[in-house]
Amino acid sequence: MTDRRRRRLAQRRKATGLSQERLAEALGVDRSTVVRWERAETDPQPWHRPRLAAALNLSIDELADLLADVGQAPAPPDERLGYVLRNPGRVDLIAVAYPRECVQRLDERYDRVPSTLLLAETGELHGQATFLRQHGGHGPVQRELAAAVAESATLMGQLVWDASQRRDHVASAAYFDQAISAAQVTRDAVAEANALLRKSYLALYGTKQPKAGIALTTRAASVSSSASHVVAGLAQLHRAEAHAMLSQAKECSDALGAAEAHFTALDARDPAANIFCPSHYARLAGSCWLSLNKPNQAMLALEDARQLVAARRKSTAVILGNLALGQHSATRCRRRSVLPAPGHRSDREDAGRRWTQPRFRRRPRTTSLAPRAHGPGRERPTPHPHEFVGAPT
């Protein structure tokens, strides 16, 4: 049975702010009657039409046009996707739009949901986009499929790395390389730079190769410099952290300045504005100061980052962890600064030593077994080692 509906009639009712119940009450009919009208199962009787037109703010002729517009409901997006997966040659832009939209929703949930909960659905969508790209579509459809692969592969690389507790660098790098290649086909500088940036995380925080991280973040910043201030700024931030890992303070400071310049210039039209967080700069700057052994500056930056993070996010744990490290480092620095020079004894230490001296001197054990004279004709035995000289009686 075909699903035929008067969709424009239902849209008009909603546009006037009426529910089916409210419209039925205004017309003096049951709600089921309105439902049958909108499903094109029955037509309004002639005596209902003037009041129906008035309720919808329409003329009689306009109402007649809406009642005559009966169309078949389009297949749900997931059903359409299932059809083109069985018939790849029939893939079209509508079918491609559905997995792209799903991947974007999953990416928006990344910072609030454990990665393991997103991995299965993202993997399925990535496999579908890859299959359709290989077996169907031409021209604009093939371009949209490449864009879908770039987005899903970038997210998959991050999720796989997280799920492996950031140990599976090889599989994640393969996903990021796939994303970079697909983005180059579509000439999407933002998607390419984002994949390069995610790949730099493997070098910086996984394999601990800051020089490789510098190369990747520099490339990401160059690719996105004129396309997205957000991605370019993030690339410069992570380049700064790579320099900090190498104790290159000047290069780190230059990269932080470049990042700040990009973030100052961004606006709502930036294609990557949805991934920008106000705490990014302070959080990464604080991490840089920690690496450069400047805990006081790190604590100031990380405290700013903590206040900027409004909701509980994955980055919140990173900020709090770095804050704890900064406080520990600052405490150690303060302790070192107040320690006396070698060979120097403070007055307080002398006083402590005086007050902790034992009040009674312990007599050493005698090694002689000869008896000692103790008065005329008497001998005193050798004292017990725990007996004190001058002990009170």
Image (cartoon, rainbow, N blue to C red):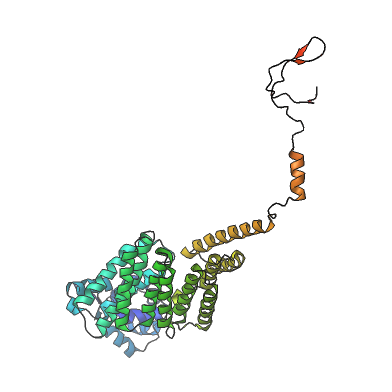
The reply to whether residue 30 is visible in this rendering is no
Q: Quadrant of the N terminus?
A: bottom left
Point 56% across, 66% down: residue: 302
Q: Nearer the viewer, residue 89 or 59?
A: 89
Point 29% across, 75% down: residue: 149
Instruction: Indicate the position of residue 305 as horizontal and vertical percent values.
Output: 55, 68
Instruction: Indicate the position of residue 332 as horizontal and vertical percent values.
Output: 61, 57
Which residue ends up furthest to the top in the rendered image? 377
Instruction: Indicate the position of residue 95 as horizontal and vertical percent values.
Output: 26, 77
Which residue ends up furthest to the right in the rendered image? 376
Instruction: Indicate the position of residue 208 as horizontal and vertical percent values.
Output: 42, 64
Q: Nearer the viewer, residue 273 or 20?
A: 273
Q: Is residue 334 left or right of residue 215?
A: right
- Occupied quadrant, residue 61: bottom left
Point 71% across, 18% down: residue: 382
Reply above or below: 227 against 126.
below
